[in-house]
C-alpha cells in the first residue's frame, strides 16, 4: 500500500501486525516422498484478525475509509471468520459494522456471535434464501437500500480489492517454489494467489464445500485476466462445508503433535489432509517444493466444542 493511497487509520492498524513466517514442515513422512512442504503462517499475523481475513479486508477497508464511509455491512454464518475479523477491525478503526447472519438467531449465541456483539457489530438474522440472494450483490455500492455512509462487502470479503492484499502475501515469499496451495471458500484468496504468482508456478485451491464446481467461474470472474496455471481440487470436502470425519480430526491431532501447528477442520485441516494424501499417492514429483497458506480461522475451532 503506497502511503498516498493508504488511509492514516489503516496505517496505524497495520503496525499491530507481525510478519507471517514461512515455516518448513519437518515430518519424516514427507522426506520419504522427497517433497518439501512449507506453511506460510498467516495465522500468526494477528491474534484476532488472522489469516487470509486481513489480506482480503485491507484494501476494501482502505477504500471505504477513503470514500468517507463510516459503516461496513457484510454477511456470514454463525461461526464466520470473516465477520469475526471485520467486527474486531471495525472496533479498532472506530467504524460501525453490521453483519447479516445466515439463519435464525440461535437460543444460545455461538462464541463467534458473542464476540461480534461484544465488539459492537449490529447483527441481523436473515433466512437462508434471503442470505443466498445477498450473494448477487458484488460491488460495494450495489446492496439495495444502502445509505451514502455505508459500504457493502460481499461474503467472505470476496471483492476485486481482496486480490491486492493477497498479492502482498505472495510478495513476502522469499524462496522459489513449484506449487502454491490454499483452502477455498469463496475463491477470492485463490484468485489473489493466481493473479500474483508467476505463470510457471502451479496454484491449487482445495474446496471446503461439496459440489463446489461453481468456484471455477467465481475465481475466473475475480481474475482481471485469464490464467491457465491453476486448478481447484473438489475431492476433499469430507461431506460438505464444516463437516468432519474421525479420520480428518485424527489427522489434525497428529499434525499438531508432529509439527506443533494447530489447524482447524473447516479449511486448513482439509487442505493439509488432501496434500498429505496426494503426496502419498505420488501426485507430486520428488524434489518439488510446495507452499501451503495457513489461512488462520482458529477462532472457528470453538464451534466444535459448543
Ligand atoms: C480460515 C479460512 N481459510 C480459508 C478461507 C477461504 O477463503 P476464500 O473465501 O477467499 O476462498 C476462509 C474463508 O474466507 C477462512 O475463514
Image (cartoon, rainbow, N blue to C red):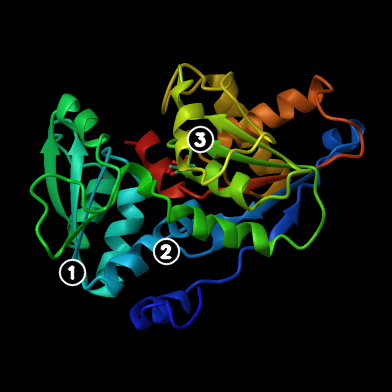
Quarter of the image where one finds residue 57: bottom left
Q: Nearest the camera: 75 or 252?
A: 75
User: Residue at left 84%, top 22%?
Assistant: 282
For label 1, the residue is 70
Q: Between marks 1 and 2, how big is the CA–CA gap? A: 15 Å
Q: Nearest the camera: 242 or 212?
A: 212
| Looking at the image, residue 231 lies above or below residue 114 | above
For label 2, the residue is 58
Mark 1 Cα-neighbour bin, 10 Å: few <14, some 14–19, many ≥20? some
Quarter of the image where one finds residue 254: top right
Q: Are circles 1 and 2 on residues that touch, CB within 8 Å? A: no
| Looking at the image, residue 75 lies above or below residue 218 | below
For label 3, the residue is 220
Q: Between marks 3 and 1, how big is the CA–CA gap? A: 31 Å
User: Residue at left 46%, top 63%?
Assistant: 47
137 left or right of 261? left
Q: Nearer the viewer, mark 2 or mark 3?
A: 3
Q: Nearer the viewer, mark 3 or mark 1?
A: 3
Mark 3 Cα-neighbour bin, 10 Å: few <14, some 14–19, many ≥20? some
Q: Position of residue 75 (x, y in %)?
A: 25, 43
Q: Nearest the camera: 269 or 65?
A: 65
For the question of whether residue 280 can be seen, the reply is: yes
299 left or right of 208? left
**Mark 2 or mark 3, which has the lower sequence index?**
2
| Looking at the image, residue 36 lies above or below residue 164 | above
Q: Position of residue 211 (x, y in %)?
A: 45, 16
Amino acid at each position: 500500500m503506497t502511503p498516498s493511497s493508504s488511509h492514516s487509520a489503516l496505517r496505524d492498524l497495520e503496525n499491530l501486525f507481525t510478519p507471517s513466517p514461512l515455516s518448513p514442515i519437518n515430518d519424516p513422512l514427507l522426506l520419504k516422498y522427497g517433497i518439501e512442504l512449507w506453511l506460510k503462517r498467516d495465522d500468526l499475523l494477528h491474534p484476532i484478525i488472522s489469516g487470509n481475513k486481513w489480506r482480503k479486508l485491507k484494501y476494501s477497508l482502505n477504500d471505504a475509509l477513503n470514500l468517507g464511509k463510516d459503516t461496513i455491512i457484510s454477511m456470514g454464518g454463525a461461526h464466520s471468520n470473516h465477520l469475526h475479523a471485520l467486527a474486531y477491525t471495525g472496533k479498532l478503526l472506530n467504524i460501525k459494522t453490521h453483519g447479516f447472519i445466515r439463519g435464525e438467531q440461535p437460543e444460545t449465541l455461538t462464541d463467534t456471535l458473542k464476540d461480534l456483539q461484544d465488539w459492537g457489530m449490529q447483527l441481523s438474522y436473515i433466512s437462508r434464501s434471503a442470505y443466498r440472494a445477498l450473494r448477487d450483490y458484488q460491488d460495494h455500492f450495489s446492496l439495495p437500500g444502502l445509505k451514502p455512509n455505508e459500504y457493502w462487502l460481499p461474503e467472505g470479503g470476496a471483492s476485486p480489492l481482496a486480490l491486492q492484499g493477497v498479492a502482498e502475501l505472495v510478495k513476502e515469499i522469499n524462496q522459489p517454489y513449484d506449487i502454491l496451495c490454499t483452502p477455498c471458500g469463496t475463491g477470492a484468496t485463490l484468485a489473489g494467489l493466481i493473479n500474483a504468482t508467476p505463470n510457471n508456478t502451479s496454484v491449487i485451491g482445495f474446496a471446503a464445500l461439496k459440489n463446489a464446481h461453481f468456484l471455477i467461474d467465481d475465481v475466473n470472474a475475480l481474475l482481471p485476466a485469464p490464467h491457465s496455471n491453476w486448478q481447484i481440487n473438489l475431492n476433499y470436502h469430507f461431506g460438505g462445508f464444516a463437516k468432519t470425519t474421525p479420520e480428518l480430526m485424527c489427522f489434525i491431532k497428529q499434525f499438531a503433535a508432529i509439527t506443533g501447528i494447530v489447524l482447524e477442520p473447516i479449511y486448513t485441516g482439509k487442505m493439509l489432509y488432501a496434500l498429505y494424501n496426494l503426496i502419498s499417492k505420488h501426485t507430486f514429483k520428488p524434489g518439488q517444493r510446495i507452499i501451503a497458506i495457513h489461512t488462520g480461522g482458529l477462532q472457528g475451532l470453538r464451534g466444535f466444542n459448543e
